[in-house]
Amino acid sequence: MSTTQPPANPADDYDSPWKEAIEHYFPEFMAFYFPVAYDGIDWSKKYIFLDNELRSLLPEAEVSKRVVDKLVQVELLKEKETWLYIHIEVQGGQPANFAKRMFVYHYRIFDKYNKSVASFAILADRHRHWRPNSWGFAFAGSKLQLEFSIVKLIDYEPKIEELLRMDNAFGLITAAHLLTQQTRKKSEERYHAKLRLIRLLYERQWERLRIVELLRVIDWFLELPKGLRQKLKTEICQIEGKQKMPYVTSFERDAKEEGIVIGKEIGVVEGMEIGEEIGVVKGMEIGEEIGVVKGVEIGRLEVARKLMASGFSAEQVASIAEVPLALLV
């Protein structure tokens, strides 16, 4: 007997989760992937992300080709030069000029700040033997060479169970990245992988904000078709009945989309009615404008009522559905 297959996964977003994860958990990122560098940084001092400055050094066309680039200013322990600039790239493909590009960015950063620079790369592709880690040139005794540290995420693939037991956030994040790649175009497998990661997060004795942030990262990685998102929502609501921690990531999008659809439907009807009272031609124009606006508002309230009935707090519903809190209390 044939069965209807769910739609394939939408295009996976590897950019947003890595950016957010590195920004939220930079010390854990360095400790997990580059422990020697981590040990040389003074983490009691403030570190500074310089993403705008980095973008100014790179051609716009080049920026669009990478998963994520970060430039971070840190202070060092027991070094003559207090400041160090760390350049991080997470690379999802296999560009032929990757190593040369790391070299170019390294010297551009040095040229701008006249301070030491350290370059690190996360190779997030699926090709086990692609591991560029240096670039340079030499002639007649003159030589210039950059060697940079790399981590190949696919090396962690046999250790996914171990990753899921780690306290470092990047154990979970690395597992989520690998599971996203493994379940490409396998919606049911991805659904079960995502549900498992979410259950594990709820079981951790971490502070609420950390769990919510990591739920957001998981949600970005393991994108599901809308039908499976709704199925997942039902499962999560059962967990939240005990945990009191609503899951409001991909469901925010679903709620807003539903509100807009309901609003437009109501808006067309009410707009037509207002239009008929004012006049056929002008009334249609004014009525549709007023009706759509009013309809969207009504639609959002309808979505808000559904979310409240599902157990979300008034504050959360006000943020998700974009309605005044005063209308919900």
Image: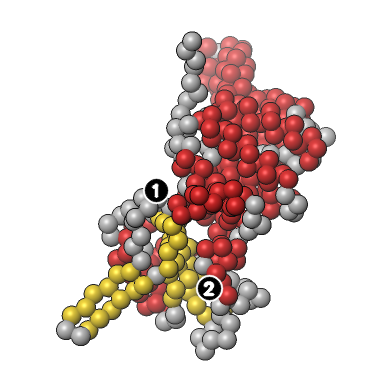
Across and down, in percent, residue 290 comes to: 60, 25
Disc on the earlier residue, 1 or 2? 2
Query: Given the current orientation, which residue lies at the most extreme bottom position?
Result: 80
- Structural distance between the alpha carbons of marks 1 and 2: 26 Å
Residue with the mark numbered 2: 36
Viewed as shown, does residue 166 lie left or right of 69? Answer: right
Residue with the mark numbered 1: 126
Residue at (37, 78) in percent of width and height: 111
Seen in the picture, residue 324 relative to 150 is either above or below; the reply is above
Viewed as shown, does residue 198 lie left or right of 288? Answer: right
Across and down, in percent, residue 154 comes to: 45, 52
State whether residue 49 appears in this view: no
Mark 1 residue type: Arg
Across and down, in percent, residue 100 comes to: 29, 66
Mark 2 residue type: Val
Q: Quadrant of residue 54?
A: bottom left
Residue at (54, 84) in percent of width and height: 82
Viewed as shown, does residue 154 lie left or right of 133? Answer: right
Q: Nearer the viewer, residue 64 or 30?
A: 30
Query: Given the current orientation, which residue lies at the most extreme left position?
Result: 140
Across and down, in percent, residue 225 comes to: 52, 29
Q: Nearer the viewer, residue 310 or 40?
A: 40
Seen in the picture, residue 148 relative to 167 is either above or below; the reply is below
- Say how the picture is coloured: secondary structure
SS at circle 2:
helix
SS at circle 1:
loop
Query: Given the current orientation, which residue lies at the most extreme right position?
Result: 329
Q: Nearer the viewer, residue 95 or 274?
A: 95
Residue at (34, 62) in percent of width and height: 132
Viewed as shown, does residue 308 lie left or right of 117? Answer: right
